Image (tube, helix red, strand yellow):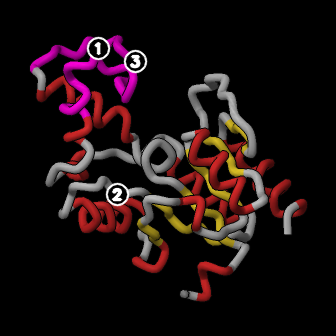
Amino acid sequence: MNDFLLDYQIVLVDVDGVLADFRTKVRNDFYKKNDILIQEEQTTVLFDDEVPEEFRNSVQDLYGYKGFHDDLKPTKYAKDILDIIRVCRFKPIVCTSPPLKAREWIGERVQWLQDNFKLSLDQIIFTRNKQLVAGKTLIDDLPDNLSRWHTNNNSPGICWNPNRVKIEGQGFIQVTDTDQLYSALRLIGRSYV
C-alpha cells in the first residue's frame, strides 16, 4: 500500500458534482440523445429517480461513453475548493468512482483532471468503495457516500451542496459555499485526529 493512503492530512474530493458539472452534462446529453428540446429557463437537473422509467437505461449509458469528458465543464467553485483545501494545509486527493462498463472512461477522466486542475496521477484514486480510502475527510455531494465513509473512518465527511437543498443524513457537515467549506475544514483539522 502506498504511504500517502495512510496520511491523515489528505482530503478526499469527489469529482462528479463537486469538481465536475456532471449533472448538467448528463442532462444535456440525455436531451440531445432523445431529441428533446431544452428550455433556456429550465434549471432542473435530470438524474436517477427524476428520469422516467423508460429512459433510465439510456441515462446510465451516458455516464461512460467514449468522449464523455470532451465538453464536461468544471463546477463554478471547483478551483476554489481545491485552493481552500491547500490553504487549510491539507493535500487534495481526487477519489472518483468509474462506471462499470467503460474502458476509455478512466483514461479520459485522468486527462480531464490533468487539463482542468493540473493534477498528477498520484493525486487521483479510482474506486467503487470510497469508504475504504483513508483520509482526514471526504468532500462529496452524495449523502450516502458520506455516511458510509464516516462509518469506516470515524471522521465527518463534508457534503458539498451549493444548491442549498436540505439534505438528510448522518456523519457529515453540510456546506453551501466556499466560506462554509473553509470553516468545516478548519474544524475538522482541529478536532479529529
Instruction: Provide the secondary structure element on which disc 1 rests.
Output: loop
The secondary structure that most of the magenta stretch takes on is loop
Residue 138 in the image, given as x and y percentages of width and height: 63, 56
For label 3, the residue is: 44
Quadrant of the image occupied by residue 109: bottom left
Identify the residue shown where x is 15% and y is 16%.
Answer: 36
For the residue marked with disc 3, what is the amino acid?
Thr
Report if the CB atoms under discs 2 and 3 are less than 8 Å apart.
no
Q: Quadrant of the N terminus?
A: bottom right
* Residue found at x 21% / y 49%: 68
110 in magenta: no
Q: Give the residue drawn at x 61%, y 52%.
A: 139
Given residues 117 and 136, the one toward you in this image is 136
Residue underneath mark 1? 40
Name the one closer to the observer, 79 or 9: 9
- Of the numbered discs 2 and 3, the one sitting upstream in the chain is 3
Q: Is residue 129 left or right of residue 49?
A: right
Tell me the distance, in whole angstroms, between the alpha carbons under discs 2 and 1: 31 Å
Where does label 2 land, which residue? 98
Q: Earlier in the sequence, mark 2 or mark 1?
A: 1
Residue 183: horizontal and vertical position, in percent? 80, 48
Image point (68%, 79%), residue name: 7
The kind of residue on which mark 2 rests is: Pro
Bounds of the magenta segment? 35-59
Q: Position of residue 132 (x, y in %)?
A: 58, 66
